[in-house]
Image: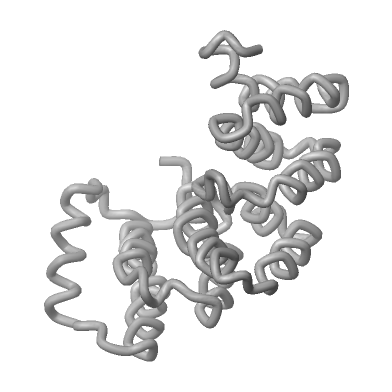
């Protein structure tokens, strides 16, 4: 593993078993418990302990909400690598955003517009990919706008994020994504274009 962070070498199946034991030993019955346990695990030094923090946060869907986004944001900034960031962005921040959008709350738009302009590349990546599981609830206008506004970036993780987000949306609106890709082909990086078009090509729609 290319990291300076210490790790035990414990694989996901074993981490899942450990998570069950953690939940038995430290039952979470309140928002305070939730924050305390997640942060306590996150602040431990080993990579697997941080994976457990993220898994614990995901294990309580009713507590994945706006009030905990600052905690998730802190973890994204400190984690600063895709194996932490992507789950945090999609399954935690993204879930809170989706639930709020379904309730017609307006704060998700403000959050996303703030994050997409953040100096931290991992926060910008999070703004692009947090909708990949939103399906028909995707804010397509923002998705396309973010891709246009950041397609000039040269960082691999931003280019990959753009392609991933477009590919996910192509399952819902293949015509719209195809049109977008054709219109911006000369400006998108090769990586973003290929990733965005992958599902369309496989289905013979591109």
Q: Is residue 98 visible?
A: yes
**Residue under the point 37% across and 85% down:** 36
Q: Viewer-proximal residue, 148 or 70?
A: 148
Q: Viewer-proximal residue, 39 or 29?
A: 29
**Residue under the point 55% across and 71% down:** 103
Q: Viewer-proximal residue, 157 or 8?
A: 157
| Coordinates of residue 73 in the picture (x, y in percent) | 58, 69
| Coordinates of residue 42 in the picture (x, y in percent) | 40, 71
Q: Quadrant of residue 28?
A: bottom left
| Coordinates of residue 163 in the picture (x, y in percent) | 65, 32
Q: Quadrant of residue 25?
A: bottom left
**Is 133 above or below relative to 116?**
above
Left or right of residue 40: residue 28: left
**Is 61 above or below relative to 157?**
below
**Residue under the point 80% across and 19% down:** 182
| Coordinates of residue 24 in the picture (x, y in percent) | 12, 77
Which quarter of the figure is the N terminus placed in?
top left
Q: Is residue 189 visible?
A: no
């Amino acid at each position: 593993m290319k990291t300076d962070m210490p790790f035990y070498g414990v694989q996901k199946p074993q981490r899942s078993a450990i998570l069950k034991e953690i939940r038995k030993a430290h039952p979470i019955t309140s928002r305070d418990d939730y924050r305390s346990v997640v942060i306590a695990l996150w602040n431990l030094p080993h990579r697997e302990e941080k994976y457990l923090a993220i898994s614990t946060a995901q294990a309580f869907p009713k507590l994945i909400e706006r009030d905990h986004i600052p905690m998730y944001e802190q973890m994204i900034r400190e984690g600063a690598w895709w194996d932490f960031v992507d789950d945090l962005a999609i399954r935690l921040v993204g879930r809170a955003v989706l639930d709020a959008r379904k309730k017609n709350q307006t704060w998700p738009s403000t959050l996303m517009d703030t994050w997409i302009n953040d100096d931290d590349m991992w926060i910008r990546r999070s703004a692009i990919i947090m909708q990949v599981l939103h399906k028909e609830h995707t804010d397509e206008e923002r998705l396309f706008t973010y891709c246009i506004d950041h397609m000039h970036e040269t960082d691999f993780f931003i280019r990959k994020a753009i392609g991933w987000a477009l590919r996910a949306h192509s399952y819902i609106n293949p015509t719209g994504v195809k049109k977008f890709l054709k219109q911006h082909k000369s400006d998108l990086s090769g990586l973003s274009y290929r990733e965005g078009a992958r599902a369309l090509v496989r289905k013979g729609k591109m």
